[in-house]
Amino acid sequence: MPRNKVIFYLIENETHRKVSYKKRHIGFLKKAQELTTLCDIEIATIIYSPYSDEPKVFPNHGATINTFLKFK
């Protein structure tokens, strides 16, 4: 039985939107860490959001710079 198509829309309530973002942010970083560990690959992410003053960098600033420079 196929799954139903999910319709994405903006969450109007600011509090619910922030909570949803926080949960998805944590889940995304967890998946990135798992992928790095299980597949022995380099992953570099920069996440900028209106909910924080500065961007979040995974795994750290130095490793992210090195990964992006490698592909530049």
Image (cartoon, rainbow, N blue to C red):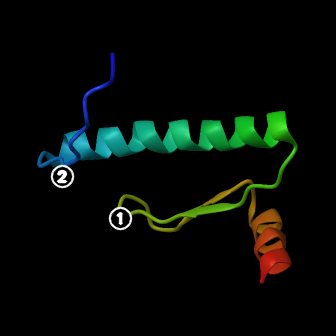
Q: Which residue is mark 1?
A: 50
Q: How many marks?
A: 2
Q: Is residue 40 above or below residue 54?
A: above
The local secondary structure at tag 2 comes to: loop
Residue with the most extreme left position: 12
Residue 2: give x, y in percent of width and height.
33, 23
Q: Is residue 28 above or below residue 56?
A: above
Q: Nearer the viewer, residue 29 or 38?
A: 38
The local secondary structure at tag 1 comes to: loop
Q: Quadrant of residue 51?
A: bottom left
Say the numbered circle drawn on residue 2.
Answer: none
Residue with the most extreme top position: 1
Q: Residue at x 74, y 55 (%)?
A: 43
Q: In the rendered view of the protein, which quadrant contains the N terminus? A: top left
Q: Residue at x 81, y 80 (%)?
A: 69
Residue 59: give x, y in percent of width and height.
74, 53
Mark closest to the chain's N terminus, 2 or 1: 2
Q: Which residue is mark 2?
A: 10
Is residue 13 shown left or right of residue 6? left
Q: Is residue 16 above or below residue 2?
A: below
Q: Residue at x 84, y 72 (%)?
A: 66
User: The residue under label 1 is which amino acid type?
Assistant: Pro
Residue 7: give x, y in percent of width and height.
20, 42
User: The residue under label 2 is which amino acid type?
Assistant: Leu
Is residue 72 shown left or right of residue 10? right
